[in-house]
Amino acid sequence: MKTSSTKLLQDLGAFVLADSHQPLCVRRAAELIRAERGYRWVGIYKVTRGECVIVAGTGEEPPTYPRFPVTQGLCGAVVESAETLVVPDVKKDPRYLPTFWTTRSEIVVPIVKDEKRRVCGIIDVESEKVNAFTADDRDFLEHAAVLLAQAICAPKKDDPAG
């Protein structure tokens, strides 16, 4: 993994531990992840009450589906399997629910809450390029998901979604 990515993961871990109950924590984390790798879009979703609900997304444009059943899309496949999914060309995968019409490849990483690997959230990263994601991206995002579990999986008193 890139040295800068390792440093970012250390910073992200400290940041999430310090601010995980602050409303903007997850949005800042999504932006840090996006900026580190130059990803086009990063969305972080919470899995709650049978739905994937967006908690934070980068950029100004909201995704087409800010909430959808856990049984749908690439994200739903990850909730079911609790395994990272890399799709080199989303146009060839019938499960794809478009977040943005210009997306060509996607990686979805589960955020798990315990050793039973119950999925409480997902990191969804999209690119306008085919075959955009490498094994290094997967490794980086899986480490980020472990760190984000503190902010996504922990119940919050003021969280209407959870």
Image (cartoon, grey):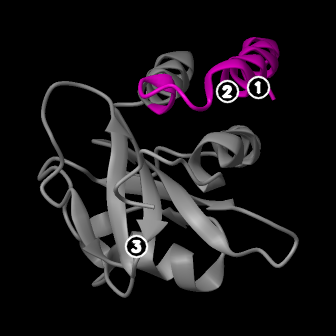
Please, is residue 53 above or below residue 7 in the view?
Answer: below
Check disc 3 and report its element: helix, strand or loop: helix
Residue to which mark 3 is pinned:
74
Q: Secondary structure at mark 1?
A: helix
Q: Position of residue 5 (x, y in %)?
A: 73, 20
Q: Does 54 sit left or right of 30 as displayed?
A: left
Above or below, 82 against 126 in this view is below
Q: Quadrant of the C terminus?
A: bottom left
Quadrant placement of the N terminus: top right
Name the residue rendered at 71%, 19% in the picture: 18
Q: Are marks 2 and 3 in contact (CB under 8 Å)?
A: no
Q: Amino acid at mark 2?
A: Val
Q: Are marks 3 and 1 in contact (CB under 8 Å)?
A: no
Q: Quadrant of residue 60?
A: top left
Residue at x 88% of width, y 71% of height: 115
Give the Cα separation between the discs numbered 3 and 1.
Answer: 27 Å
Cα distance in 3D space between marks 2 and 1: 5 Å
Q: Looking at the image, which residue is at 41% across and 49% down?
A: 159
Say whether disc 2 or disc 3 marks the residue closer to the N-terminus.
2
**In screen coordinates, is 75 left or right of 128?**
right
Give the x, y percent position of residue 48.
44, 70
Q: Main secondary structure of the magenta part?
A: helix
Q: Nearer the viewer, residue 38 or 161?
A: 161
Instruction: Tell which tag, 2 or 3, sits nearer the viewer.
Output: 2
CA gap, disc 2 and disc 3: 26 Å
* Residue 6 position (above or below residue 118): above
| Residue at image mark 1 | 13
> For the magenta stretch, what is the residue range?
1-26
Mark 2 lies on residue: 16
Amino acid under disc 1: Gly
